[in-house]
Image (cartoon, rainbow, N blue to C red):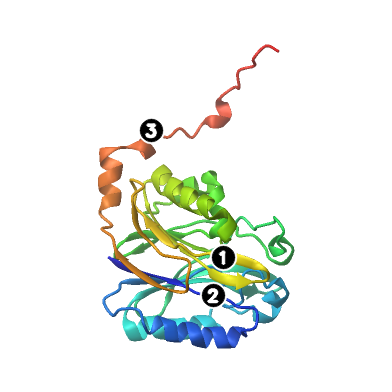
Amino acid sequence: MRIALVQIASPDEETAAHRLDRASRLLAEVPGDVDLIALPELWKVGFGHFDRYAECAESMHGPTVQTLAKIAADRGVLLHAGSIVRRNADELFNTSLLLDRTGQIIHHYDKVHLFGCRSAEPEILTHGRQVHATDTEFGRFAAATCYDLRFPPLWERFGEAGAELMVVPAAWPARRLEHWRLLTSARAVDNQMFVIAVNAVGTHAGVTFGGHSRIVDPWGEVIAEAGAEEGITVAEIDPSVVAETRTEFPVLRDRRTDYDSLTPKKVPA
């Protein structure tokens, strides 16, 4: 399975419409033998442009997805759209989507953990309410988004849903780049799955984003890691490694789920 990680910047002076056009031109540079193209979190609006969320919000069948669906169908690839600000009735969500080789939406995920540290995301958006995995030709696929990396119990739910390939669109700042590396590797090892993590780059709203999109296999080996600039990184993985790893080293089989029944030992003062 060949994967293209596409890092996109969201500069302050650029309109969302212009960025969609520019991203389309960048996607045209992805090699033709790729099976999956993956984009970052909220690349069209720019994560830190909170004042633009409402005006840029769209449905799952809005202009962004329509444009990417045509690219997926024309190229015959799976395309993970990163995430968009999705409007559903009177609520806004940070929603990631996977398009199949015909351009149809086969998976979507609403970000569960909204980032509240010097961020207006929780004030504007509604958190997601469910997790699930979707069968693809390469295995069971699921997605989490950026801040979700910090919450292992959520990832256990993805594992229970049968996820083998996790795509993580992100807008992770450069100042916490080592956390990005640590957590993407940890979640891959914890859950014995591939983590395909795609990060934003450039500076907007006063924050510099770290890039270094990466693919980590179930043993924690880094298959590929990009740099800090806008561009495309292509790598190849073998999805069968997930089943082989889980058979050889059955961590998930041995995981306890009854932690609430464990009584903390009280140590005398």
Q: Are marks 1 and 2 in contact (CB under 8 Å)?
A: yes
Mark 3 lies on residue: 254
Residue 243, percent across and down?
Answer: 28, 48
Give the alpha-carbon distance from disc 3 to disc 2, as whole Å.
42 Å
Mark 1 to mark 3 CA distance (whole Å): 38 Å
From the image, state whether disc 1 or disc 3 is nearer to you. Answer: 1
Mark 3 Cα-neighbour bin, 10 Å: few <14, some 14–19, many ≥20: few
Q: Residue furthest top?
A: 268
Towards the viewer: 17 or 192: 17
Task: Please identify the quarter of the rendering in which residue 139 is found.
Answer: bottom left
Q: CA distance from mark 1 to mark 2?
A: 9 Å
Mark 3 and mark 2 in contact? Answer it, CB < 8 Å. Answer: no
Instruction: Answer whether labels 1 and 3 touch (C-beta < 8 Å).
Output: no
How far from the left and from the top, in percent, is residue 238? 25, 58
Residue indicated by mark 2 = 9
Tell me the amino acid under the disc marked 3.
Asp
Kindly identify the amino acid type of the residue bearing the numbered disc 1: Phe
List x then y, in percent, for residue 130.
55, 57
Q: Nearer the viewer, residue 62 or 179?
A: 179
Which quarter of the figure is the N terminus placed in? bottom left
Q: In front here: 268 or 104? A: 268
Tell me the residue at 57%/54% (across/down): 176
Which is closer to the viewer, label 3 or label 2? 2
Which structural element holds mark 2? loop
Numbered tag placed on residue 209 in the rendering = 1
Quadrant into which the C terminus falls: top right
